[in-house]
Amino acid sequence: MTEQVSTGAAQGEQNPQFSLQRIYVKDLSFEAPKSPEIFRQEWAPSVALDLNTRQKPLEGDFHEVVLTLSVTVKTGEEVAFIAEVQQAGIFLIKGLDAASMSHTLGAFCPNILFPYARETLDSLVVRGSFPALMLSPVNFDALYAQELARMQQSGEAQA
């Protein structure tokens, strides 16, 4: 029994490991270009949300994942406000194969970051004296699957 354990360790087998190390705001921006005039108009907002993720390896088995939420809200043709938050996290991830690592960085980690980004964005908008912005949940697994399908169709290599 002891021989099998040490043989497995010698072959580099290890159990997958995932640990959240830190969550932080990397960048934050808010602009209300038509204030104070915009507050005197009838409030009929249209919301455009742009969502993006990126990741980069850090030293060892640490990875930074950044979720960017950019929101432009218009009332009629006037831009009421533009808000953006880059919510980031440092994750310790090891023992995963390439496909599992890609899924973890592309879907699982952004899913963890989203509630923090949504709350930060909502707080920022309220501080700008606008009604609360309650973003709906996002299915990062579905977005990840769509991106993989798009990459396969265009012949891009998986990063």
Image (cartoon, helix red, strand yellow):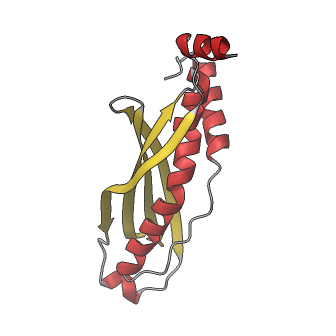
Residue shown at 64% from the left, 11% from the top: 3
Q: Residue at x 44, y 61 (%)?
A: 71
User: From the viewer's perspective, is 17 left or right of 91?
Assistant: right
Percent position (x, y) of residue 159? 48, 23
Q: Nearer the viewer, residue 137 or 70?
A: 137
- At x 61%, y 14%, the residue is 8
**Farthest residue, direction right:** 1
Question: Compared to 24, does 132 lie above or below?
Answer: below
Residue 77 visible? The answer is no
Q: Nearer the viewer, residue 115 or 18?
A: 18
Dividing the picture into quadrants, the one containing residue 78 is bottom left
Compare residues 50 and 66 and report the one nearer the observer.
66
Residue 51: where, in percent of width, then height? 49, 49
Instruction: Work out whether residue 133 can be spotted.
Output: yes
Q: Quadrant of residue 58?
A: top left
Q: Is residue 39 left or right of residue 119?
A: left
Where is residue 43 drawn, in percent x and y? Answer: 50, 82
* Residue at the limit of the structure toward the front, as seen here: 2
Between 23 and 55, the residue placed more toward the observer is 23
Q: Is residue 22 above or below residue 92?
A: below
Q: Is residue 131 above or below residue 159?
A: below
The quarter in which the N terminus is drawn is top right
Residue 13 on image: x %, y %: 58, 18
Residue drawn 52% across the image and 65% down it: 47
- Disc tally is 0
